[in-house]
Amino acid sequence: MLDKPMIIGCDEVGYGCLAGPLVVAGVRAPKDWALEGLNDSKKLSAKKREVMRGKLHKLIQDKVITWHLAERSNIIIDKHGVAVALKDAYVEVFHALYQPDSLIISDGILKFDSLGVDDYDKMSVIKADTKFPTVMAASILAKTYRDEKMHKLHQDYPNYGWDSNVGYGSKDHLEAIVKHGPCSLHRFSYAPIKNMKLADTRQLGLPLLEDYLNGKPV
């Protein structure tokens, strides 16, 4: 399959976060495409990621590469489970970018059997974000998009430090949840929030987990 002329690299960000969305990005480019400075987004500084983001968006604008981003909210994650939400986002990206001349490479060990993409040429590769330029590019685009969104959401929810922890379970974030309780952008199906006493959420005027998962107004 590696003889396909086009590669679609895919990666996700936000899987383990306590708040905010899960994001999957895909980048489609020629097999021999590369860009100086590309690396796994986790290995780049925030400043370097932004530089690379600018370069990638210029290539997208010039139609050298194409991309698609799929986002799943905390509400979707809580209702269907993060594993289902993750695969659903990946499948959206596959459908948006796939053509018969393409090979899809996703990071990790995910399987997509019976999800409407069985006929697509695809492979999951452990640490693909350190091996394939398109996966590196996807990881950068996903990470910078999500970080920017969490920084903006911090303006509306300043108690949780999302301008620095972007929703991950850092010490300051966990302490803020204990002090202020969760907000409507937190994942109520994730510990420690799912383990909070219902009486505590009532007292804080927050939605109960059962109401939240059943789609009642929050």
Image: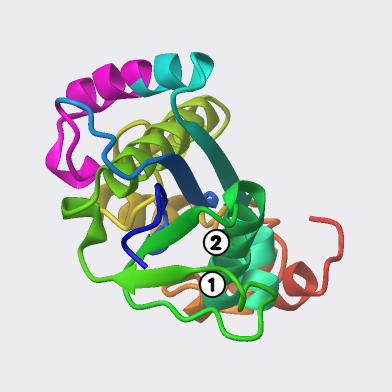
The answer to whether residue 42 is magenta is: yes
**Considering only vertical position in the picture, is 32 above or below 20?**
above
Marked residue nearer the N-terminal end (1 or 2): 1
Between marks 1 and 2 in the image, the one whose residue lies nearer the viewer: 2
Sort mark 1 into few (<14), some (14-19) or many (20+) by Cα contacts within 10 Å: many
Sort mark 2 into few (<14), some (14-19) or many (20+) by Cα contacts within 10 Å: many
**Amino acid type of the residue tagged 2 in the rendering:** Tyr
Residue at 52%, 76% (x, y): give it.
Answer: 83
How many circles with numbers are drawn on the protein?
A: 2
Q: Circle 1 — which element?
A: helix
Residue at 23%, 33% (x, y): give it.
Answer: 34
The answer to whether residue 177 is magenta is: no
The answer to whether residue 197 is left or right of residue 166 is right
Residue 70 in picture, x, y percent from top left = 60, 49
Q: Which residue does the numbered mark 2 point to in the structure image?
A: 90
Residue 170 in picture, x, y percent from top left = 26, 53
Q: Which residues are magenta?
A: 37-55
Q: Which residue does the numbered mark 1 point to in the structure image?
A: 82
